[in-house]
Image: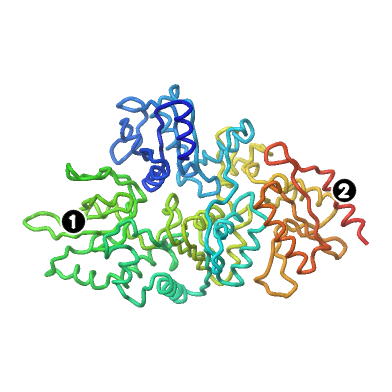
Amino acid sequence: MKVFLRHLRKVEGPSATLLAAPTGKARVRLQAATGLSANTIHQILNDVGMLGPNYRILEKPEKGKRICKNIVIDESSMPSVELLAALFRAIDVNAFRRLIFVGDPYQLPPIGPGRPFVDALRWLREKHPECIAELKTCMRVTQTASGQTSFSKGLELAAGYRDEGSPGDDAILSELVQKGETSDVQIKFWSDHNELLGVINKVLQDEFGIHGDDAAAFDRSLGIDEKDWRKCENWQILSPTRIQPFGTDELNRIIQHRFRARLLELARDPHSRWPRPMGEQEIVYHDKVMQRVNQQKWLPKDAKGLRFVANGEIGIVAGAWKGKSGKPDNIQVVFSTQPDSEYRYSRSDVKEAIELAYGLTVHKAQGSDFNTAILILPRKAQTLSRELLYTGLTRFIGKLILIVEKDSQPLLDYRRPESSDTMRRTTRMFKLLIGQDAGDVGIVGPYRPEGLIHRTSDGTAVRSKSEVIVYDVLLSLGLSVQYEHPLIAKSGDANDFRLPDFTISYQGRTWFWEHLGMLDTASYKAEWQDKERWYEVNGYSERLITSRDYPGGIGGIVYADEIRNTARTRILSAD
């Protein structure tokens, strides 16, 4: 992004470029990446007078529209239709030349209505594919135990939860389950609540030297001892939900009571110098907290800072004062994004705007990243989806630690396209779409919600249109087809597996069909060669069949006749 904006300035000369992000954390990252000033979308709305009481979005700007030539919106998967519409009402749309969306369409869809980024991307792929620039090469490298460097295995693992995964993402999952660790990823398992807490304790001990209830070591891991407030995001526990024993409400309570027991005791003592614990979560001095509403905040005249705290900013309670002479109790919070500013919160402010942040939901963590992300994955949770898991897997910078209930089955289940929340949304900005409850209208095909998911003729959800063609051709020939069914190594080790695109059965015999996409990409080709070797080592190569996309069209071209002829030759005519 920095290079792009620098080149744009070189070509066009100085021009007004508006950098926008949906959260305070995303704004800071965008600003750091570009070296230019950035704003949250709510800050832009506030500047033009479009935020009313309780931060309600108003219909029109009261202070005039923003004028700029280029608009960059980071973390574009997060804004809802409503928020984006408000942003466009706040800007003079006749003045700008470029609207640039930056984001990952496989992350969580907006909390509010719609999925405008995905819709816009689909429309661009169909109408203006030349306007899309996709990052296809992983630029993050890690150091192996032997001292060599390799691409991030954590990000390669996460690629399995996109529509277009790589040939090697199933190998990484298999290796991780077998060894418990690979490159920058670890996996651990739990069966009940007590075992989950034990695993978390072991992770804190092994990774950060926190033994038992050692509050001093705990504070060091968060930078509290040196007042290095940016370090409060050194590590982060993530969960798919607030409720349940594995949810953030319970985990925050347990962690706070373990490491803040003495401070809680002092704060509850009416004779101590500390104010009473604040809010329902009993927040005290040195607690790690998160801002949960967008809010303008007072700072002294000569103080640094934005005088605005955005939803999602994480910080530490750096001060706590007991009110005297009729003055109220208050705490002071320093946020990692504004480490030179101390924001004051009264008891009522805390109740409205602050919550504990030792554990965060994946939704709350979207737009943030952490040096070490500790992701808890239960077998079932109402909020779980492919996008939630993908978002959780991509929140780390240095290390990802997965704490999975019982076995690796959840990691397999949520790879499947039908687990996508984005694709189940019955909204589409550029085409008519009728919801699932409107069956009496009699509208079928692309105007139904199912038209947003790649489905085969028998209803199986797959990752791409090419796979739909391959699957349906195989089915039309009378073959039995399973999609991404685990294939176990000849050793019988259930943790050593691969996921063929299609497992085909015919007259009591079985074949494995892989459809290949980006063979012109070096990393993709290398991963496929590794997977091909696995088939050979395990004695499956004679039953392995491949097909491929050819250049052209949107995402490549697959020829049905070629698939049909290959299947007839290799399967139907096999001896």
Q: Is residue 75 left or right of residue 253?
A: right
Disc 2 on helix, strand or loop? helix
Q: Which residue is mark 1?
A: 330
Mark nearer the N terminus (2 vs 1): 1
Q: Amino acid at mark 2?
A: Asn
Front residue of 55/502: it is 502
Which label sits in the foreground, 2 or 1? 2
Mark 1 element type: strand
Please, is residue 574 above or below residue 452 in the view?
A: below
Which residue sits at x=62%, y=34%? 129
Vertical position of residue 266 compared to residue 102: above or below: below
Residue under the image location 25 percent in, 55 percent down = 333
Determine the CA span between mark 2 and mark 1. 75 Å
Numbered disc total: 2
Q: For residue 415, what is the image quadrant?
A: bottom right
Give the image's coloring scheme: rainbow
